[in-house]
Image (cartoon, helix red, strand yellow):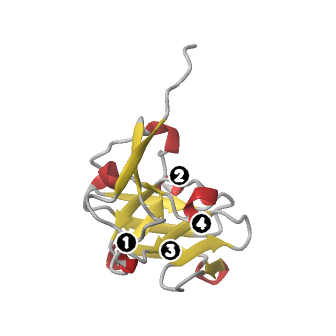
Amino acid sequence: MPNFDMSEARGACHCGTVRFHVRLRDGLRSARRCTCSYCRMRGAVAVTAEPGDFDILEGRDKLTLYQFNTGTAKHYFCSVCGIYTHHQRRSNPNEYGVNAACLEGVSPFDFGEVPVTDGINHPSDGKRSGSGIVGVLKFIAAEA
């Protein structure tokens, strides 16, 4: 089980071509999922970092960028193995969402509950009111 208070971590894509270091100001407590069309299909748990706190150590030239709809969010993935590593957020371009499963010692199944944000009614479109949390995704391990 990872330390949810971790302040920094190393991470990599599946094949190890893209390697990075990240500083997490709120540890793993910032974990979120999203309901937008892309995140629904991607299915990753993302934690928050500021762009200055995310450093690509290796494989920058192997990162591929995907953008859709407004083109504001920038989703990066390894062009070798296809794993999503991080994205610059549309809701706050001064934040990155980092794939928690890419962090050393972290699995998306370590999170018992993950808040889910409303990416369909995006705040940048003036559609969201309230907290923006529309639910919670739970992982309940089967008894051995």
For discs 3 and 2, the disc positioned in front in the rendered view: 2
Q: Which residue is mark 4?
A: 38
Q: Are marks 2 and 4 in contact (CB under 8 Å)?
A: no
Q: Secondary structure at mark 3?
A: strand
Q: Earlier in the sequence, mark 4 or mark 3?
A: 4
- The x and y percentages for residue 121 are 43, 67
- Secondary element under disc 4, as helix, strand or loop, is helix
The residue indicated by pointer 2 is 101
Q: Position of residue 76 (x, y in %)?
A: 58, 74
Residue type at tag 1: Lys
The mark nearer the N terminus, 2 or 1, is 2
Label 1: state its secondary structure: loop
Viewer-closest of 63 and 21: 63
Q: State the CA–CA distance, disc 3 to disc 2.
A: 18 Å
> Which residue is the site of mark 1?
127
Query: Do tag 1 and tag 3 residues touch (Cβ < 8 Å)?
Result: no
Separation of residues labelled 2 and 1 (CA atoms):
30 Å
